[in-house]
Image (spheres, rainbow, N blue to C red):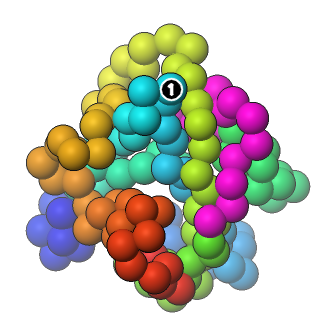
Amino acid sequence: MDKEKRPLHIRAALRLLHVYFSFARGMTMGVRAACFDAEGRIFLVRHSYVGGWHMPGGGLERNETVAEALAKELREEGNLRIIGKPQLIQVYFNTSTTSRDHVVFYRATVEQTAPRPPDWEISDSGFFSLDSLPAGTTEATHRRLAELRGEQEPDHRW
């Protein structure tokens, strides 16, 4: 969903959150991962506050390592447990919401410990075949998958 198409109350809430983060943090950093199960399917989430299907992830908190944030976000957003060691793919500069955000992107093999019921943050989630992604999968998700397949060079911007 384009920023302009978001409902006014969502745009206002996101703006307020980013104003808060600009005081609380000099720069924001988040993690995302392309999470694949044993069948080679990718796990995607649909958030309640922003349109489209995304790879799971979220922001780092103070005193939290990237590895800790990655494990926490995958657990919270999908009941996912990382199998083995995740592969660091790239660090991206993300200007879609603010001019101070960076995304640390991984590829991980995961297993789901229990189905993930919808809640206030995640309205839907699931594993999808790469040749059958859900309608509304974000352009950024498509770009990251093309990079993982070697179809395009990694960009430095999310």
On screen, residue 84 versus residue 57, left or right, reads: right
Mark 1, Cα crowd under 10 Å, few <14 / some 14-19 / many 20+, is: few
Q: Is residue 21 visible?
A: no
Residue at 38 percent across and 35 percent down: it is: 41
Q: Nearer the viewer, residue 107 or 3?
A: 107
Q: Which quarter of the rendered picture does the N terminus lie within?
A: bottom left
Q: Nearer the viewer, residue 41 or 96?
A: 41
Residue at 39 percent across and 78 percent down: it is: 152
Location of residue 32 in the rendering, given as x and y in whole percent from the top left corner: 55, 55
Location of residue 31 in the rendering, given as x and y in whole percent from the top left corner: 61, 58
Disc 1: which residue: 38
Q: Which quarter of the rendered picture does the C terminus lie within?
A: bottom left
On screen, residue 95 versus residue 7, left or right, reads: right
Location of residue 143 in the rendering, given as x and y in whole percent from the top left corner: 35, 70
Q: Nearer the viewer, residue 65 or 100?
A: 65
In this view, 60 is above or below 16? above
Location of residue 155 in the rendering, given as x and y in whole percent from the top left corner: 47, 84
On screen, residue 114 versus residue 15, left or right, reads: right
Q: Is residue 78 magenta?
A: yes
In this view, 85 is above or below 103? above
Q: Is residue 117 visible?
A: yes
Q: Is residue 14 magenta?
A: no
Residue at 23 percent across and 73 percent down: it is: 3
Question: Of the residues shown, which amino acid type is indicated by label 1?
Answer: Ala
Q: Which residues are magenta?
A: 72-89
Where, by quadrant of the figure, is residue 39 drawn?
top left
Residue at 61 percent across and 56 percent down: it is: 106
Secondary structure at numbered mark 1: loop
